[in-house]
Amino acid sequence: MTLLLSIALYLLTSVKSQCGYDEYHEEALEKGVLTQETWDEMEEHFEEEVEFWDNWDEDTDFFRRIRRLASDSDLTSRYFNGTLEIPVIVHVLYNPSHTVNLNDLIQLEQIQSQIIRLNMDFSSNNIENIPNSAFAALKANYMMSFKLHKVIRTQTSKTELTTHWEAADVKEAIDRNHYLNMYVSILGSNIGIGYAAGPGYAARSDYINIHYQFFGDPTFLWVMLKGDWKKTIAPIYTGSNIEASGRTATHEVGHWLFLEHLWGNGTIPLEQICKINDHVADTPEQDRANVRCPHDAPTSSCGSLDMYQNFMDYSDDNCMALFTKGQLIRSLSILNQVNNDKGRKGLVDYQSV
């Protein structure tokens, strides 16, 4: 059986469609990898930052205040100067005896395409149209740049990872205070297509992990002209011709930067639907995840239109288009906490060295 045929058969039986962040978060609390006290302190600090921006302008309407900021650099300059460069360590976990040997499959061009996708999305340079003009006005530029620092390839005897903790057992995250550790692996169907640690996790488990079929962006022309790795990229749905374009990583890095799903995290009791949310003022309350791309029939819940194009929803990759200014403030709040273990202040300290 040829390598490409084997990969194709594996792809058809393995396509998954959800984020494992909620489960990872709950398990982290149970195992003591993250404490509720740490998380609550970060939430309290975020509320203090929101209060700061509330007092920035006498207008009582949060949306109008935020929209009047001349640029997103007015927000980010409170936390860092210019553009914050985040170095990335990519870990490729591979089993040389597996039908799909990621050491052979995940090459530098694929890794570079994923870094490019992150930089486009977090700098708001992506080109997707946002039909809702009110939502479009909230689109934020994070003023952050991701730069590939190194690629580490680690051999494992595992054919796939079936728990959220096995990646760290194979290779622990490196210097999480100064680097984004991004893993590429074969994730079991019970894990989802990716998951991430939020801030405050124990150092060895502070990383994001992406299932290999959803890693990288084959839509960049210069990538499409090279090699055939893009043939392994999974369709969003079985039988669909809509390919993943690297936005699983965009979504997971959002979690790494303290963002939650628009509908809140975890299993929400029926009586709490529309009462639990992502703690961000300019993302509408939402009672569930959106899928596909409902441009022609925009979805609504909790009494308002859903922001289905937000990177923290589950819409198709080619539908996602924005982080909001409120989400930017939430992410920025973890950059100026005194205790580095309860945020990501080390990223800013690293830039200052």
Image: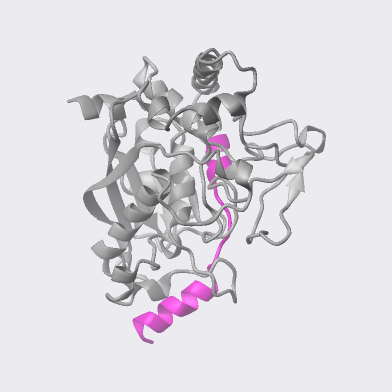
Q: Is residue 319 above or below residue 307?
A: below
Percent from the top left, x then y, of residue 132? 63, 48
Which residue appears at 32% of the width and 65% of the height?
102
Percent from the top left, x then y, of residue 67? 54, 31
Q: Is residue 276 left or right of residue 257?
A: right
Q: Which residue is at the front of the view, 164 or 121?
A: 121
Q: Which residue is at the front of the view, 110 or 280?
A: 280
Q: Is residue 291 above or below residue 27?
A: below
Q: Is residue 129 left or right of residue 290?
A: left
Residue 235 is one of the magenta-drawn residues: no
Q: Is residue 98 above or below residue 59?
A: below
Q: Which residues are magenta?
A: 1-26
Q: Quadrant of residue 110?
A: bottom left
Percent from the top left, x then y, of residue 334? 42, 25
Which residue appears at 64% of the width and 39% of the height?
266
Residue 15 is one of the magenta-drawn residues: yes
Q: Residue furthest bottom?
A: 1
Q: Quarter of the image containing the C terminus?
A: top left
Predominant SS of the magenta segment: helix
Percent from the top left, x then y, of residue 189? 55, 60
